Image (spheres, rainbow, N blue to C red):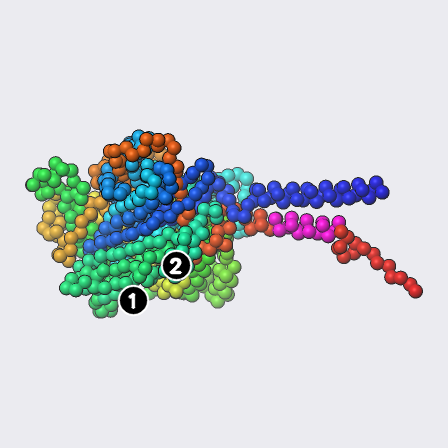
Amino acid sequence: MNISVNRHRVHYLCSSLILLGLVILNVLFPVYAMPTSKADGRSAEITLGVLEYIQEGEIHYSLPLSTDVSMKVSGWVNRVKVKQTFTNNTQGFINGKYHFPLSHNGAVDQMRLVIGERIIEGEVQPKLQAKATFEKAKAAGKRASLVSQQRVNIFTTEVANLAPNETLTVEISYQEKLNYKEGQFSLRFPMTITPRYSPTALSEQVLVGNSASSQSSSESPSRQQRHNHLGIFDSIAEMLPEMLTGFNLNNFAEGAVTDDASSDSAGNIMVNINVELNSGFELGAVTSPYHKIKAAPVVGKQQWMVELDRAVVANQDFVLNWKPVDAAKSHAANHAEVALPLPSMFIQQGLTHQSAELRSAKNSINNQDYYGLVMLTPPQVKTYNGVTPRELILVIDTSGSMEGDSIVQAKQALLSALAGLRTKDKFNIIGFNHQLTKLSASSLKVNSRNIAKANQFVQGLQANGGTEISMALSASLLIQDQSNQIGSENALRQVIFITDGAVANEQGLFKQIEADLGQSRLFTVGIGSAPNTHFMERAAMFGRGIYTYIGKTAEVKQKIEGLLQKIEQPVATDVKVTYQDGTIPDHWPARIPDLYTDEPILVSFKSPAYNQQDIVISGETQGEYWQLQIPNPHQTRHLDNSDIEAPGLDLIWANAQINAIEATQTRANSERIKQQVKALGMKYHLVTSQTSLVAVDKTPVNFTPEFNADYQVKPHLPKGLNKAGVLPQTATSSRLNILIGLSFLLIALLHGLWLKQCLPGQRLTIPKHK
């Protein structure tokens, strides 16, 4: 009897231990995946117009009453005003903070705070000074607002002392240049931010002997450590706010997000957009590939009014395209003949934000610098007689942020690229998240067997884990084995990098691309509803390639085929912009990339008033030198579209110059770079990494500001990234943890059945004999 009791005690003790293990597992590995990098515990991405608040130690949520975006396009420049209106529905004063994305090409130069009938204009101050001004006003009970930059394309606005039942409107204005490719202009307005992944210290993985994959890189630890150092974020910009990295499902909006734009259910963040399109030429088509719009020409003018068909959920970037009425005809007419790049230019003299003393001086404008945009249009060339062999490295991001529509589009892009390979080519495929997976240790020849193997490899890819782009760049750009080279001096080594770019260490990755590029060319393909366009455009620029965006599956085949056709051979190389005497203007990009078919380049420049020289553009086309001369900007305000004004070109140049300066930042020159960026921000009235916009009301309205509540808002997931796909978002072994949990549950179930002697073979039944 005692033996039986002790046996039952042992059984119950085992059951208790299993249950305790399940409880511990649930605590350590909750339903959502937690990051294993420095971003441990960070919460969800922030979307457009997110007002954040915390009250009495608990997170509460509020949504903007409205978000209205107005754009005014003039030639190649777009002036954007983002107006977001919030209401304090509480019975006390509140402080607020919200994070939002803006164009990575945008130069933020103006902010207005509208509270009731009061309008408060923002003033640019050095960042620390602006923060101190805001905090002092907040402590004094004054209404105030502060706009600061977290990244080139991510900004934060803070507001203080909003009274009960009071409405707050924040207006932020910025200037940006437009995109032009394949005969059409386009603009993009970001509406949401894909969560950024903060990379782990890969050198630690080397020390503990963590293998990158079953087919890991052949790099030595010292080389890996060097590239890991380059990949870690190293910039004068602030670290991203915690809410911009990682995932926490509790922080996402519960509102019903559907493709029906009229779905304005509670919890949705809705956006209205209208565009005044003054292109300077007769338009043949105005389209938006991802949203429904209403577009109508203005009678008697070369102008169109465009607006969204209705308010939309802020979960996918807005893109607008337009082209001249005769673009198709002119393209077809010139396709059969070789034509030199035809540059065109817009000019502005003086500053957009001038001091009162400068504005009052009547003759001062004649002594001010010129700012301009030059478009370098690649020539239309005949089909090349010879076919240059190439080594094509296809790199695909399989991290958790690619879950859903993004991974489907990326895999389709790979399959389309494989279908476009030629028998003289070689290829390889690299998949990456927080690990590397290669199709082959070295590049393969193009034949039916290898293509079939590659198709099977692509079909087996799944989205999960972190986004360690540094490892993928090392594996794709660096030639590990000389046998990987095709063997021809004229062979093209091209890397097509397919990703959403959801990383926080952009600056370090740019440095790595410059260090490792060699003779390779890097072409980036953006995937998803809200990719990190800033990273991918600049990565392609540093990689001397081009950037392609794919926003929906229906675009994959056409855009990948077009990309492969373009990159067979650059149309113009060694492109330079100089004055007549050979001196170089102050222009950006400083190193002009190669020109490809239908891929012109906009060069922003500054010319001093005393310089009367013409601008000379030169390069090589099919091995032949060419040169073109543009009259100096003092002779004409602009060469084309004489009825179009192009204000704000100084802001675009200054913003590009700041990005160029920050790209050269190292630990040794960090302080000097900060001072240069701050000086440019103050001179041109821009929000930068070292300057902010602050607005303060003179009259105190709150006499107990220490009791203010701080507020926060739930964002939307990017369209196509389902909540079911959020689980394996960051660099974790989440699927393994789930498997472990299920295993424990199965063990517990079997143990319970064993205790009840219900398992097969536990009871021996002896048949009765008659």
**Residue range of the region highlighted in magenta in the rendering:** 741-755
Instruction: Between label 1 and label 2, give the one nearer the viewer.
Output: 2
- Give the residue type at disc 2: Ser
Residue 579 placement (x, y as % from top left): 16, 47
Q: Where does label 2 land, which residue?
A: 263
**Labelled disc at residue 769:** none
Residue 129 appears anywhere in the view = yes
Which quadrant: the C terminus? Answer: bottom right
Disc 1 element: loop
The answer to whether residue 678 shows anywhere in this view is no
* Alpha carbon distance from label 1 to label 2: 50 Å
Q: Quadrant of residue 1?
A: top right
The answer to whether residue 684 is left or right of residue 434 is left
Camera-side residue: 407 or 114?
Answer: 114
Q: Are marks 1 and 2 in contact (CB under 8 Å)?
A: no
Give me the residue at 56% from left, 51% from top.
Answer: 735
Q: Position of residue 711 (x, y in %)?
A: 39, 41
Residue at 51%, 44% (x, y): give it.
34
Image height of 562 relative to 48, above or below: below
Q: Is residue 194 above or below residue 56?
A: below
In the rendered view, tell whether residue 135 sits above or below residue 16. above
Q: Which mark is residue 383?
A: 1
Please state which amino acid type lies under the numbered disc 1: Thr
Image coords of residue 307 (percent x, y) = 27, 59
Residue 339 vs residue 187, the one in the foreground: 187
Tell me which secondary structure the magenta stretch mostly adopts: helix
